Image (cartoon, rainbow, N blue to C red):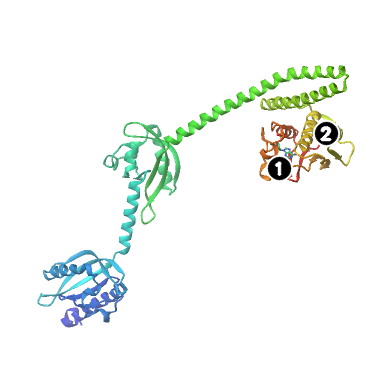
């Protein structure tokens, strides 16, 4: 049968069936109602949106889904429909069966019968929750950008400014109208235009440019030091379409940095002056001290009276102490000036240790100092006088930082061709967190050194001497139990 031979009724029936199928399967909510507002049809999407089944909805008044405060809308809608008008994209809120309010966009069209009389209305509703949320989010972001203290602007990949927040107005002096649509070179000093090429090339590859420190020019010509962070802006397909820039004025930071640098320089100069003064003062002290030592020696030979002999002896001891302090100060200034010389020779370190132990035992006979070594003679390469200084320092510290009648042990071992020397005391010990500092210049452990005079230089000098010999120096210690100070000397070449 030819198409034009199909009876009109059959054609209409076919069309109606097709429309019915579309309404059944569409994702859009389609509802119809008569002019009284009674629901006459309700598709599956309507059931999904509002939760009422077709049976529950058809025959009910449309107010079933209209929140009470919006019932007036229905009067307006029916009035328009009766006039034969269509209402497009009417944004409102409807209520689902579970009470949830759904933001929707409505399109309402009049339905007329064969005679052209309006008998009802069809409604197509679309859930706009997501669109609303996206719009709210966008609004919030816009508000953040607008109120941010940071300058935020965006531009196309051709460098045309597309947004310019209030902070940008404040920083550069151009209003939004003056800036938007202009090329970004508006604020770039001519000699820095290349930077823009670099930034855009990074952004095009999808890369971020972080904390880029540069200069930009304000409307009044003033150069502003800024830190820039530039991120690519992408469209919904992930295509880079522009860049957003956040700029922070770092003039304050730079000024602070400059001030710090200046202070640091001043401190360095002052420190150098202090070192120079210490060097000079100790040098000046050394000359009269040497004469005093000489005269005291003569005096010691001449004095016969026992009581006076003791006085001279005590004075000699004090002068020796003073001399040792001045020597330490002189050594420090030599180190600072890079002038501490080592006289490297072959020497028997067992002999040096034994002599040092004798010397210290003699002056401190209330301590018992032992020396253990697997050999009686052990040749080392180095400055014997300086190595003796280290051992004497370890021993005097072992005595100064322990109470009377304590044992002090000195060990020498030979390990892998190198020499290891340890001085162990049972004294006050050092807290673990302070151990790392004791070899620093002028450092003294507050609690431990409170009752002992000293300059905090001995271990610093020992450290310098041993490291310059290519050896290592360290201490093991337990607070309240005692310490062992160690040094090594590498094997002889
Ligand atoms: P000084 O003894 O003149 O203060 P040092 O450089 O020789 O200077 O020692 C630094 C600090 O290390 C001392 O002030 C002391 O607190 C601590 N110290 C050194 N040797 C010992 C030790 N054997 N026992 C406990 N503490 C020590």
Residue 77 as seen in the image, left or right of residue 161: left
Secondary element under disc 2, as helix, strand or loop, is loop
Residue 430, label in figure: 1
Residue 24, label in figure: none
| Residue occupied by mark 2 | 364
Viewer can see residue 7: no
- x and y percentages locating residue 222 in the rendered image: 35, 31
3D distance between C-alphas at marks 1 and 2? 23 Å
Q: Quadrant of ligand 1?
A: top right
Work out whether mark 1 precedes mark 2 in sequence or the reverse, and give the earlier one: 2
Secondary element under disc 1, as helix, strand or loop, is loop
| Above or below, comparing residue 291 to residue 219 in the picture | above
- Closer to the eye: label 1 or 2: 2
Viewer can see residue 354: yes
Query: Observer-nearest residue: 421 or 194?
Result: 421
- x and y percentages locating residue 272 in the rendered image: 61, 25
Q: Residue drawn 58% across and 26% down?
A: 270
Query: Observer-nearest residue: 263 or 244?
Result: 263
Would you call the spot at circle 2 few (<14 residues within 10 Å), some (14-19), or many (20 or more)? some
Q: Is mark 1 within 8 Å of ligand 1?
A: yes
Quarter of the image that includes the C terminus: top right
| Above or below, comparing residue 172 to residue 157 in the picture | above
- x and y percentages locating residue 271 in the rendered image: 60, 27
Query: Observer-nearest residue: 160 or 422?
Result: 422
Q: Residue drawn 18% across and 67% down?
A: 73
Residue 134 occupies quadrant: bottom left
Residue 137 occupies quadrant: bottom left
């Amino acid at each position: 049968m030819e198409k034009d031979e199909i009876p009109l009724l059959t054609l209409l029936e076919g069309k109606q069936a097709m429309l019915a199928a579309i309404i059944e399967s569409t994702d859009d909510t389609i509802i119809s109602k008569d002019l009284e507002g009674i629901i006459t049809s309700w598709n599956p999407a309507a059931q999904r949106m509002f939760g009422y089944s077709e049976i529950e909805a058809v025959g009910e008044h449309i107010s079933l889904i209209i929140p009470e405060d919006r019932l007036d809308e229905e009067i307006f809608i029916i009035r328009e429909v009766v006039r034969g008008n269509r209402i497009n994209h009417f944004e409102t809120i409807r209520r689902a069966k579970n009470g949830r309010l759904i933001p929707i966009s409505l399109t309402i069209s009049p339905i007329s019968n064969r005679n052209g009389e309006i008998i009802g209305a069809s409604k197509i509703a679309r859930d706009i929750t997501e669109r609303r949320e996206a719009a709210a989010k966008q609004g919030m972001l816009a508000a953040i950008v607008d109120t941010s203290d940071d300058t935020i602007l965006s531009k196309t990949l051709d460098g045309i400014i597309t947004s310019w927040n209030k902070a940008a107005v404040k920083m550069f002096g151009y209003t939004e109208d003056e800036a938007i649509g202009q090329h970004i070179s508006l604020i770039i000093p001519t000699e820095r235009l290349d930077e823009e090429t670099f930034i855009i090339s990074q952004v095009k590859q999808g890369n971020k440019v972080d904390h880029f420190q540069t200069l930009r020019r304000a409307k009044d010509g003033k150069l502003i030091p800024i830190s820039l962070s530039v991120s690519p802006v992408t469209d919904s397909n992930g295509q880079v379409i522009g860049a957003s820039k956040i700029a922070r004025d770092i003039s304050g930071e730079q000024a602070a940095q400059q001030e710090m640098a200046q202070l640091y320089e001043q401190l360095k100069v002052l420190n150098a002056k202090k070192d120079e003064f210490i060097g000079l003062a100790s040098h000046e002290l050394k000359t009269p001290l040497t004469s005093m030592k000489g005269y005291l020696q003569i005096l010691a030979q001449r004095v016969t009276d026992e009581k006076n002999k003791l006085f001279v002896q005590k004075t000699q001891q004090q002068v020796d102490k003073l001399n040792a302090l001045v020597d330490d100060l002189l050594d420090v200034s030599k180190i600072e000036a890079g002038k501490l010389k080592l006289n490297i020779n072959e020497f028997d370190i067992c002999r040096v240790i034994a002599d040092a132990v004798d010397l210290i035992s003699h002056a401190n006979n209330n301590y018992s100092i032992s020396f253990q070594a697997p050999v009686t003679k052990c040749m080392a390469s180095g400055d014997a006088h300086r190595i003796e200084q280290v051992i004497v320092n370890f021993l005097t510290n072992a005595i100064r930082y322990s109470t009377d009648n304590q044992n002090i042990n000195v060990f020498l071992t030979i390990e892998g061709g190198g020499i290891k020397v340890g001085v162990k005391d049972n004294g006050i010990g050092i807290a673990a967190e302070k151990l790392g500092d004791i070899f620093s210049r002028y450092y003294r452990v507050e609690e431990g050194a409170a009752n002992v005079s000293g300059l905090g230089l001995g271990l610093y000098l020992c450290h310098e001497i041993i490291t310059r010999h290519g050896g290592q120096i360290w201490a093991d210690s337990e607070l309240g139990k005692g310490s062992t100070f160690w040094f090594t000397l590498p094997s002889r070449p």
